[in-house]
Amino acid sequence: MRLLIVEDEKRLALSLAGGLTAEGYAVDVVHDGLEGLHRASEGDYDLVVLDIMLPGMNGYRVCAALRAAGDDVPILMLTAKDGEYDEAEGLDTGADDYLTKPFSYVVLVARIKALLRRRGRAGASPVLTVGDLRIETAARRVFRGEDEVALTAKEFAVLEQLAVRAGDVVSKAQILEHVWDFAFDGDPNIIEVYISALRRKLGAPRIQTVRGAGYRLVAGA
């Protein structure tokens, strides 16, 4: 899952990004409303965490612009304000949820997961099945037959990208875009490390290498 944080309090934004990255999400961060609108419009995000009080363009206007353009990405609004009027205004512009600062990080993560589950019910199934492999995307659990397979957060994220396109070739670029953040400038061959780990845990025949194109998840033996 790929998230965008639009928050001008840099310490807060980086703290949230660090925590969410540890949860297994790919996280991009911007500190300006106009840049946030541009990034959200151009990127393929699963959810946007959007502050209201932003330089350049406030969160209300960013949200309204995305909805006017037909973008239905889930939006969780953050604000230092409180009161029913502020919440109503945020929701009226098209936000899916609203959290007032200061907030608990645990509550933020719970709200994010709830919004992603809600979107999953409306779109892709929260449970992906490929042969005897069952991937519970909301619970972030993987089963091979009746046996649960322990995966790290990044291993799960890579597998999820292969599973949602099971049978199709998924390129390294597609995996990097959704599992690592926008600013990743490391060696793209890091993906091979995670593919190797998944093959050890799930069985090598399940993940095929398509030379020059990427990887394909199949039912396996």
Image (cartoon, grey):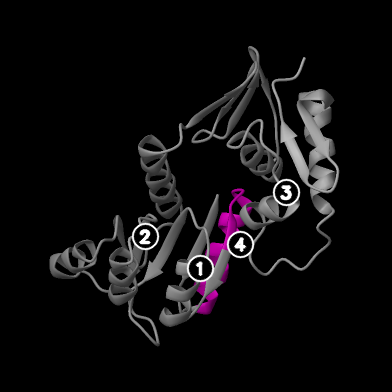
* Label 4 residue SS: helix
Q: Is residue 201 magenta?
A: no
Residue lying at the far top of the rendered structure: 146
Decide which of tag 2 and tag 4 comes sooner along the chain. 4
Q: Which mark is residue 18?
A: 4
Name the amino acid, label 4.
Answer: Gly
* Label 1 residue SS: helix
Q: In terms of depth relative to the viewer, which is nearer, 56 or 67?
A: 67
Write down the residue under mark 3: 171
Name the amino acid, label 1.
Answer: Glu
Segment colored magenta: 10-27
Identify the residue at horizontal 39%, vertical 56% (top origin). Answer: 73
Name the amino acid, label 3.
Answer: Ser
Q: Mark 3 packing: few (<14 Cα in 10 Å), some, or many (20+)?
A: some
Q: Give the mark toward the camera: 4 or 1.
A: 1
Decide which of tag 2 and tag 1 comes sooner along the chain. 1
Image coordinates of residue 108 in percent, x first then y, are 42, 55
Write down the residue under mark 1: 42
Name the amino acid, label 2.
Answer: Asp
